[in-house]
Amino acid sequence: MTISLIARDLRESATLKMNERVAIMRAKGDPVIHLGGGEPKSLPPLDALTAAAGLLNSGEVRYTAAYGTPDMKAAIIRYTHDQYGYRPTLGMVMASGGAKQAIMCALQAILNPQDEVIFPSPYWVSYPEMVKMCGAVPVPAKPMDGGLIPTISDITMRMSSNTKAIMINSPNNPSGAIYPEKFIKDVVALCEKEGIYLIMDDIYNRLVFGGKRVTNPIACASDFGSDNCKMIVINGVSKVYAMTGFRIGWAIANPKLIEVMAIIQSHQTSGPSGLLQKAAIAAINGTQSCVDNLVMTLENNANVMVRRLGAFDGVKVTPPDGTFYCFADFSTYNKDSTKLAEFLLNKVMVCTVPGVEFGMEGFLRLSTCGTSKEIIEGIERMKWALDPNSPNELIIGQRKMVRDWL
């Protein structure tokens, strides 16, 4: 059997692989704690569920336009005006089957083979593979100071004549960091000066803690909406509204680019599901208290996790500014994050995601999506497995675990 050169070079999504392993373990009855997921446990807004049920009961679930339904586009326009202070035209909006598809359509619309796309490290696990799927070259930009916050120098030193785009995710998955306003302004100015594309993955832009503010990229642009503007803003309902399974995202960009992206999408999947768009519209247009409640829960969970991680000798963690994650440096215990994650899953049934998958070896990404009780127990299990001063035995579920590896 032969497969394409592109397919041969792709790696499986580490986060989805972990989700699958956890599902298999739970089906066997293992009391696994999942600290690796990016999916809140809160239910989607009732407005969304009611709207979807109403359309489903009518039986009128049909094909939709490649750009999305008129009502969906109107809701996206409203959302953009509310969150960014900018009202895009209908021609600047495309709904997709999730923010991931919107990013993929954007990359396919702008990249040629051997073009380069720069993105700060740590980065979302799919960025490199999505770039490679276009025959292009991913260029991670790890901060020179070894931290989690990039500078404009980290970006410029990796630019070449092949640089076609820069991709920014703030608040960031996996670090939870909000990038400084100066950095965002500098990146926008750099892209405008050099005539390269800027993809702003804003999927977590409302999940921020402590009254912090995310820099509005549209406000930083000098010509957003014009035919020459090369900024693409990506968002969706998955994270903010806990609607991960609904797979509705969108892109805002200049009309010419959106037209090309919609053509690509029309041949990939046709238009996004009309049923799920109906739910997304209701979430966007409905009461927003669900977002506030989710932020409160996530912030409390993050505080619990950071405090518990503080009990480890040698673990370094920067409190997240937002998102669902803590990104902790466990290199004191094992510099190989893949081996460490496997060890924790096998020995104490705690699922984490290796930092190497995000471009930062020695780290683990820990999710704050679960309950505080799960977080506390999960961190306690990890500490028992790693700390030589812990007791020799631990009860997990109905099992007595005896530590024989330290």
Image (cartoon, rainbow, N blue to C red):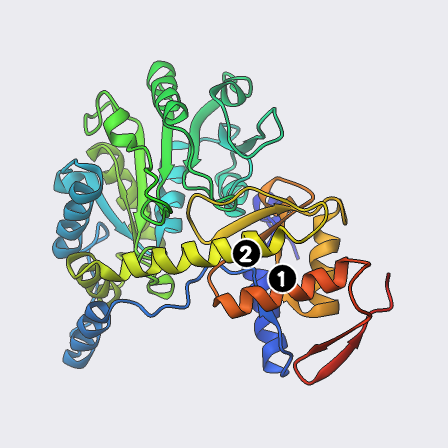
Which residue shows up at 68% across the image and 85% down it? 398
The picture places residue 159, in percent across and down from the top left corner, at: 51, 19
Q: Quadrant of the N terminus?
A: bottom right
The picture places residue 381, in percent across and down from the top left corner, at: 68, 66
Q: Are marks 2 and 1 in contact (CB under 8 Å)?
A: yes
Q: Examine the rendered structure and indicate whether residue 341 appears above or below residue 357.
A: below
At label 2, the amino acid type is: Met
Q: CA distance from mark 2 to mark 1?
A: 8 Å
Q: How many marks?
A: 2
At label 1, the amino acid type is: Ile
Nearest the viewer among 237 and 333 is 333
Q: Quadrant of the C terminus?
A: bottom right
Nearest the viewer among 233 and 216 is 216
The picture places residue 402, in percent across and down from the top left corner, at: 82, 74
Nearest the viewer among 375 and 345 is 375
Which residue, given by chain and number where applicable, does mark 2 sit on? 305
Which residue shows up at 19% across the image and 38% down it? 92
Please tell me the numbered disc located at residue 379: 1
Drawn side of residue 357 relative to residue 40, left or right: right
At mark 2, the secondary structure is helix
Which residue shows up at 65% across the image and 81% down it? 397
- Quarter of the view holding residue 47: bottom left
Drawn side of residue 243 relative to residue 173, left or right: left
